Image (cartoon, rainbow, N blue to C red):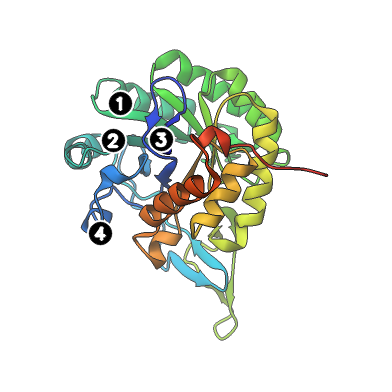
Amino acid sequence: MTDTTVDLGRGLVLKNPVMSASGTFGYGEEASAYFSLSELGAVVVKGISLLPRQGNLPPRIVETPAGMLNSIGLQNVGVEAFIAEKLPFLLEEDATVVVNVLGGSVDEYLAVTNRLNDVDGIGALEINISCPNVREGGVQFGVRPDLASGLVAALRESTDHHLMVKLSPNAGDVTRIAVAVQDAGADSISLINTVTAMDIDTRTRKPVLGGLLGGLSGPAIRPIALRMVYQVSGAVEIPVVGLGGILEPDHALKFLIAGASAVQIGTATFVDPMTPVKIVKGIERYMEDLGAGSLADVVGSLIVGD
């Protein structure tokens, strides 16, 4: 009998290592038409801000040869509507809920986090540090260790929730950011977020996205994500959650072998909504074939050299 349980620390225990990825799964309602949300290790909802956000002008999603460009602009219902209108459904579905938190300043992150402190049923907070710090001229929290650690330290003082910090691939040295947020009190790290990119329509000579630049996701970024997960998992002592272009069980297993304790599935659900469940079953089959009693036998098992 294989044990797929994952303990990410500070009370976040997953029945299996497969989670949805923020921004691709909405608030879970659509996916529940295909499978029970309780089948996943956790549901990570789209980013939640203090106030509702309308997002960017369309077009906001464009397919690319090896993935997808998006420029949604962090559209969401805001924390109050999430608590009143979205969270009850997730709890009825018996989902382990991870709330992705965003903001343009430390105060905004704190306001959302403090509001969620009073709410039952939340398994963890995933802190999106790819957001621009409006007080620092728009620079992302995730590209400067001092800003990243300062934010996480402030959040750590304000909440007992598990803090999963989502790192940006656009940082010069992602391991420096990872160590900084670990030392500031993060319980786990998820990576990578989308890679900044763009495309052009040669017929109109205009950007394909209404917001000009967007985030590239899908199989094109998988080798980048895999490399960063390997590097970060070797640099920190807290659990790492890997994501980026995972389409099938074998892809997820690559991340686990590289050092991730769990994975998130994003763009693949646009192709096949059943992908997360298929990956759960594929990991179970792999463990059975390997004779692995627990995920610990797989995580970080990469063999380098002879």
Residue positioned 44% across, 66% down in the render: 61
Q: Which of 219 and 56 is in front in this view?
A: 219
Q: Distance between the residues labelled 4 and 1?
A: 28 Å
Q: Quadrant of the N terminus?
A: top left
Name the amino acid type tagged 1: Leu
Q: How far apart are marks 2 and 3 (CA)?
A: 9 Å
Whether pointer 2 and pointer 4 mark residues with C-beta atoms closer than 8 Å, the reply is no
Ranked by sequence position, the earlier of labels 2 and 1 is: 2
Whether pointer 2 and pointer 1 mark residues with C-beta atoms closer than 8 Å, the reply is yes
Whether pointer 1 and pointer 3 mark residues with C-beta atoms closer than 8 Å, the reply is yes
Residue named by callout 3 = 101
* Residue 245 shows in this picture: no
Q: Quadrant of the C terminus?
A: top right
In the structure shown, which secondary structural element does the residue marked by tag 3 occupy? strand
Residue positioned 63% across, 31% down in the render: 178
Ranked by sequence position, the earlier of labels 4 and 1 is: 4
Question: Which one is closest to the eye, mark 4 or mark 3?
Answer: 4
Kindly identify which numbered label has been placed on residue 79.
Answer: 2
Residue positioned 20% across, 36% down in the render: 91
Name the amino acid type tagged 4: Tyr
Q: In this view, does 168 lie to the left or right of 283?
A: right
Residue named by callout 1 = 116
Residue pushed farthest top?
157
Question: Which one is closest to the eye, mark 2 or mark 4?
Answer: 4
Name the amino acid type tagged 3: Val
Q: Distance between the residues labelled 1 and 3?
A: 10 Å
Residue named by callout 4 = 34
Ranked by sequence position, the earlier of labels 1 and 3 is: 3
Ranked by sequence position, the earlier of labels 4 and 3 is: 4
